[in-house]
Amino acid sequence: NTEFTWRVSIPIWISGIMSIFAYFLTIRLIPGLKNMFIKANLFGSDMNKRNSDKIPEALGVVSGCIFLITLFIFIPIPFTNYIFENSNFPHNEFVELLAALLSICCMLLLGFADDVLDLRWRHKILLPTIASLPLLMVYYVNFNSTLIIIPKPFRVWFGLSVDLGLIYYIYMGMLAVFCTNAINILAGINGLEVGQSLVIAMSIMIFNIIELNGSLWKAHQFSLYFILPYITTSLALFKYNRYPAQVFVGDTFCYLSGMTFAVVGIIGHFSKTTLLFFIPQIINFLYSVPQLFHLVPCPRHRLPKFNKETEKLDPSVTVFKKTELNRVARLIMTVFRSLKLVNWQEDSDGTVTCNNLTLINFVIIIIGPTREENLTKILLLIQISCSILAFSIRYPLASVFYDV
Ligand code: UD1
Ligand code: MG
C-alpha cells in the first residue's frame, strides 16, 4: 500500500539527495586541501611515473569525513514519523544506526593513524577488530541470534539449524578484518582502491534495491542509507585518484570502505552475499598467503614495476635464496609452479626470482606488460564480471541450499 511505500522510499530519496550534495562538496574540498596534506608531510611519490612529484596521501579522510557528516545529518530522518507521533520510538533501530556509525568513525580514525604512523602488519589486523567491537555489542543486545540455517545438503548431519554462539561473533569480527585488509592489499596502481570499492558498493546497492521488495526490506533500507553517501563521496575521490593520480586515498580509505561493507553486511544479515562481491579480493588474498605469512620473502611494496623504456608495467619480483624457504613454503610454491601461477626463475647458485604474489602481477603475467591506466581498467572489469557472477550464483544457489 502507499503508506508503506512512502515509509520505505522517502528516507531513501532524501538520503539520495543528500548524497548528491556530498558529492559536490567532496569534489570542491579535495583540491583545496591537497596542499595542506603536503605541508603536513602526508604525501607519497607515484612509483609508476617518470617524475616523482609529491602526491598528497590519505585523502580518503576527506571523502570519509563528508560521508560521516552526511550520515550524522541524516540520523533523524528515518525517525521523523516516530518523533512527530511521539510513540513507539524504535530504540533498537536507532542504536543500530549509532553503533554502525561509531564503528565506521572509529575505523576512519584508526586508518588515519595508520597513514600517519605507518603501522606494522599485526596492527593492521588489530585495528578493524577493535573498531568492530561497538557493532558486535549492539548485535548482541539487539539480535543475539547466532542461529544459522544449515544449507539443505548438510542437514543430514547438522539438522535444520545450529547455534554458533561465540563462533559467530568471531566470524563477524574476522569479516571486518578481512574486508578492510583485502581491499588494502589489492592496491598500488592509480584508481584501483577506489575503483574496486565502488564496484562492490554498487553491487551491494543493486542487491539492496532488489531486496527492498522482500520481507527483510528494513535491513536493506538501512544498508542503502550508508551505501548511497558512500558511493557519491567515493566517486568524487575517484575523480582525483584515477590515472594520472592527483591524490592517493591512503589506508584510511581502504579501512573505511571495508568497514562500511562489513557493517551493512552484518546489520543487514547479508554477510555471505557481501563476501560474494569480494571474489577478486579473496583470490588475491589466497594467492598472497605465502607472502603475507612470510613463508616467501615479502618486500614493503609489491606493486608492479614501471619500465621507463616501454612506459608499461612489468610484474614486480621478490628475490631470495631457495634454501631460505621452509618445507611448507616449498610445497606451496611447487603447487603454484606446476599450476603455472608464478613466474619462477632459478639460477645455478640457487637464487630464485619470483613475481610478487598479487592478482595485479598475475594479470600482467597473463596479458603481458600493460600501461597503468589499462591495467586498472582490466582489473575493474574483472571486478565487475565477478559481481555479475556473484548475482548469478546468489539467486539460483540460494534456492538449492535453502528454502526460499
Ligand atoms: C599495500 C600492499 C603493498 C603495495 C601498497 C600499494 C601488501 C601486503 N601490501 O601496502 O604491496 O605496494 O599497498 O598501495 O600487499 N602508490 C603508488 N600508486 C598508487 C597507489 C599507491 O605508487 O596508485 C604508492 C605510493 O608511493 C603511496 C604508497 O603506495 O605513497 C601507499 O602505500 P600504502 O597504502 O602505505 O601501502 P600498504 O597499504 O601498507
Ligand atoms: Mg594501502
Image (tube, rainbow, N blue to C red):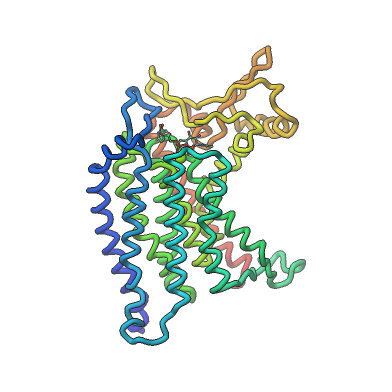
Relative to 339, say whether 94 is above or below. below
Q: Residue furthest top?
A: 348
Q: Is residue 118 left or right of residue 156?
A: left
Relative to 270, say whether 359 is above or below. above
Q: Is residue 228 left or right of residue 275?
A: left
Q: Position of residue 206 (x, y in %)?
A: 41, 61
Residue at horizontal 34 percent and vertical 53 percent from the top: 65
Q: Position of residue 163 (x, y in %)?
A: 68, 70
Residue at horizontal 32 percent and vertical 30 percent from the top: 54
Q: Position of residue 114 (x, y in %)?
A: 46, 43
Relative to 317, say whether 144 is above or below. below
Quadrant hosting ligand 1: top left
Total number of numbered labels?
0
Residue at horizontal 53 percent and vertical 33 percent from the top: 362
Residue at horizontal 30 percent and vertical 49 percent from the top: 236
Quadrant for the N terminus in the image:
bottom left
Q: Position of residue 170 (x, y in %)?
A: 63, 58
Question: Is residue 334 or residue 389 the one in the foreground?
Answer: 334
- Asked which quadrant contains residue 349, the reply is top right
Quadrant for the C terminus in the image:
bottom right
Q: Residue furthest right?
A: 157
